[in-house]
Amino acid sequence: MKFLQDQLEKVKPLFEPGGKLEKLYPLYEATDTFLFTPADETLAAPHIRDAREMKRTMITVLISMMPCVLFGIWKAGHQHNVVNQIANTGFVEDMIQGSLLVLPIIVVSYAVGGAWETLFAIVRKHEINEGFLVTGMLFPLTLPPTIPLWEVAVGISLGVVIGKEIFGGTGFNVLNPALTARAFVFFGTPKAMTGDGIWTSVLDNGQVIEGFTGATPLAVVAQSPDSTNIIQTLQNSDFGEGFTWMRIFLGDFGGSIGESSGPACLIGAAILIVSGVGSWRIMLSCVIGLAAGSYLMNAVGKSGDFIAFTQLSFHYHLVMGGFLFGAIFMATDPVSGTATNKGKWIYGFMIGLLVVLIRVANPAYPEGVMLAILFMNVMAPLIDHFVLQAHIKSRERYLKRFKPHD
Amino acid sequence: MGIDIIISHTICRIFLFFACGSTPRNINVGSYKIKHGLDLRLMGSPKPSIADASDAGSVSIYPQEFEGIKPRLQVKEGDIVKRGGLLFFDKKNEHLKFRAPAGGRVNAIKLGPRRALTEIEIEVSPNEDVETFQQYTAEQILTLSRDEILSQLLETGYLAYILQRPFSKIADPAVSPKSIFVNGMNTAPFQADIHIAVTENETDFQAGLNILTRLTNGKVNLCIAANPANPSTAVTQAKHVDIHTFSGPHPSGNSSVHIHNIDPISPGDQVWVASAVDVILIGALFLEGVLPATKVVVAGGTGIQEPSRQYYRTRIGGRLDSLLKGRCSEEPYRLLSGDVLSGIQIQPDEYLRFYQSSITAIPASRKRSFLGWMSPGWNQFSASKLFLSSWFKRSASWDFNTNLNGSHRVMVLTGLYDKYMPMRIMVDYLVRAALAHDTDEAVKLGILETDPEDFALCSYVCPSKMDVMGIIRTGLIEIEEEGL
């Protein structure tokens, strides 16, 4: 370790003001502080500081996403092997196949997004922010495993640059960068992001399993004719295996890489809540909003011949699509979400409500989580503004209580 | 906080009204439980014993400690001054005079940038002459007029021990504050405990409180800890003041928290604040008619070796050498006047500051650890839950050092600071308003109720290592310059 530290010290003058590679200082800083905790001392009061810093905070978020990543890899491989009827495959083969499908997407996301981060850090002369570790992983998890890699590169570039850097970089962005990236890919190249054929990788010359359509539970519901029994339809779909509630919760079917597994998302939620990094208020209020929305829709659905989606009950909405993933990992982004505690309740509730509204009322696409969160990202400063005005009013009332009555 | 306190306060009042026939002046009138905050458990706490260290050799006074004054020097190097002899006065208010803390020869007068007066050093003579001022008996004090008291405080410079809020500068004698707060508790690590410092000076302390009661038409509120470790009846049963008790983690001992709960500052209000340890000195001045020569300070922290971590009776403004020589750690350490959260860094060859009554020494550390962000975190304290130690070593004491434990980043997390702010203040937004120089918004958000020290814990916990204290300090200065 001493050797490594000495080497770093040796090249340091190159990167310091006046050095040959002065411009690349952010890169040096990132490497240096990645390898060794910084030697900086406090300059003024308080003379002691907590051991917590940004790296550990962001690494915790990354750890919380690991169950989703691992499950996503397994699922992509497993689906591939089952649907293409590849014989003699087990867990190991599934993981290998999954890695071949998923890892390139993650690598491209990190490499291209990281390059933009570094470029902006160098131009703007600030440190490289660890927040990108999270963005770079969140984005791939929202993509189908069949996505062309160039689209990943374009998506993350637009997400980082348009979603974050043009607002001034980390901490100043209005929208969640990972979701912005997904939105660009979603609307820019709908062929690769929508429909039934994209969620499972199918071999060109392969023989797919009989009855395979590739439709996700949400798509099954969206495609059902009005007034059919939706639960029955779900159970008859997906080449005979059927979408029971438990199967949808477990997530062993097509869909985006990281977001279909309920258990994996809940482990992530547990890590985020216990460590205090993610806001439980937002997660809980998202679920409450979703419940309110789905019961409202159920009530509307009863009153006449409405589309099948209105029948879908709360516990199905909860586990379908990317809701859990979005509520746990996307909505809780502290920069693009609301900053006040009261605001967090409103923000989460509205996300849950909007998810149901978009799912049920929008005929164009069955999922609404991404749009609901992006919309509420835009609304977040407004919510905070009202919370803040209420806070100022309550402060005035408090101070008034102590004024002598004259 | 809030309604429940108002109710308990009122019930208490009503009860006392019936029990005593009138509103009493010397009874515990309120107890407050503070929830938000954090107690840092530092190793190296001082023993509650007082040692004598009064032979300081020389003393110094640092005029720049006195916020808002412009000194006009009245001595030159080589002059012989009495203890209490005039050193300089304030150009803005010529009645406010500052006097020598000890008698002897003026050794050095140091000037800083732009010839600002930074330090006057006096070599203490073994048989120092003492300047005398008006002397009063304990009974006389209670009948003195506000003007008589103010003129003595101005004449001796002891008015500097009384600070006004907002802005924490020397109280303006032209203003009658709506109330006065005496801070008789300390929740930051290793501050002088009034219950110990008051030993042998009990009558001085009571006299000091009596003096303060003559300065306001409102109340004098003595705020003390609910369960002091070494209680002294001179404090817990002080007369002629309202006694309030506070419990809960730091910053429950900060004056801002006391004021916020008892008599909060609206824009335009002025409240005066004094530290209980300094009230002893004010009382001694009036009872003796001379400037007291010594005060009690505490020395703590692992940078000071055992068994020297304890209280000392020492010269006011005395040389630190006399306290610390041979008693400090051999490892590199940082010496602080005050506590680790809001003290200022000083060198061992300097002198005790006017305001602080504590000296802390903590290890200086530039140590780097390999892949530190990945370590399980058994050997580091964190207020967060991201370290093993936060789960399994919850009651341990820690040898805190000066390492920043990270590097500066932009503000990302929200709502974290509020967990360490026991007042009706949304810290994130106050910080943003101060950073944006939006003074109107900052005032609305309550900056006038605060002092930079109230944000020490916010700075402490910030994972982006923001200088929250500094931001608030700058914000307050801007508002003061702009005028309300």
Image (cartoon, rainbow, N blue to C red):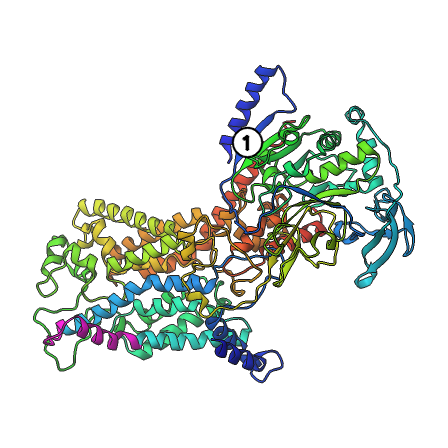
Residue A376 place in picture, x, y as percent = 39, 56
Residue A102 in magenta? yes
Residue B136 in magenta? no
At numbered mark 1, what does the secondary structure look like: helix, strand or loop?
A: strand
- The residue range painted magenta reads A82-104
Q: Which residue is mark 1?
A: B31
Q: Is residue B433 visible?
A: yes
Towards the viewer: B134 or A233: B134
The chain under label 1 reads B
The answer to which image quadrant residue B151 occupies is top right
Towards the viewer: A232 or A2: A2
Residue shown at 35% from the left, 66% from the top? A138
Placement of B289 over or under A268, stated as above or below:
above
Q: Amino acid at mark 1?
A: Ser
- Count of number-bearing discs: 1
Placement of A340 over or under B34, stated as above or below:
below
Q: Is residue B273 visible?
A: no
